[in-house]
Amino acid sequence: MTAAHPEAKVLLTVRDPERWVDSISATIFAMSDEQLPEGSRDIIFTRTFNDRLTDRGHCLGVFIQHNQAVRETIAPDRLLVFDVKEGWEPLCAFLGVPVPADEPFPHVNDTAAFQTDIQERFG
């Protein structure tokens, strides 16, 4: 993707790896085949995690290696390493846009919201 768009800015969202494993285990990994978009099982479960979804150390390693690979391959002037806890300011500065006035930074898609959405969609 970066080869196709060599001037594109890249946003790497980061978070605590342990909390990330807890989150993905309770959300994406917990989805049944019928809840997953077509092709996702192969891409996420097999190709990305080698079907080792219950191997916490392996999943942590995949997460950490991905973040490191992005940091090593994207030029620093094109990359924002961003924790959503930082809010609008660093994101807007990186993108060269003003901070939205009177617009709180969105906090959506937490584990509870994800599980509620899946339950509403698939019962």
Image (cartoon, rainbow, N blue to C red):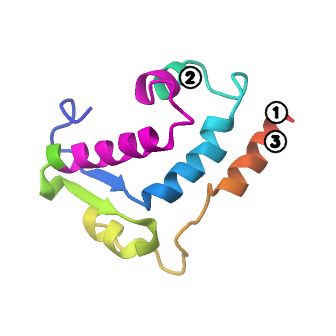
Residue 58 falls within the magenta-colored stretch:
yes
Nearer the observer, 97 or 66: 66
Question: Magenta segment, which residues?
Answer: 45-71
Residue at position x 59%, y 51% in the image: 23
Crowd class of label 3 (few under 14; some 14 to 19; many from 20; radius 10 Å): few
Camera-near label (2 vs 3) is 2
Query: Which amino acid, by three-letter code, is at mark 2?
Result: Arg
Q: Which callout, 2 or 3, points at the residue further toward the start of the chain?
A: 2
- Give percent across and percent down for residue 9: 24, 50
The answer to whether 18 is drawn above or below residue 48 in the figure is below
Question: What mark, if any, has residue 119 been given in the picture?
Answer: 3
Residue at position x 47%, y 23% in the image: 43
> Along the horizontal axis of the image, is 69 left or right of 109?
left
Q: Residue 100 falls in which quadrant of the image?
A: bottom left
- Give percent across and percent down for residue 1: 27, 32
Query: Which amino acid, by three-letter code, is at mark 1?
Result: Phe
Residue carrying label 2: 41
Does dot 3 land on a helix, a strand or a loop? Answer: helix
Q: Quadrant where the C terminus lies?
A: top right
> Along the horizontal axis of the image, is 87 left or right of 75?
right
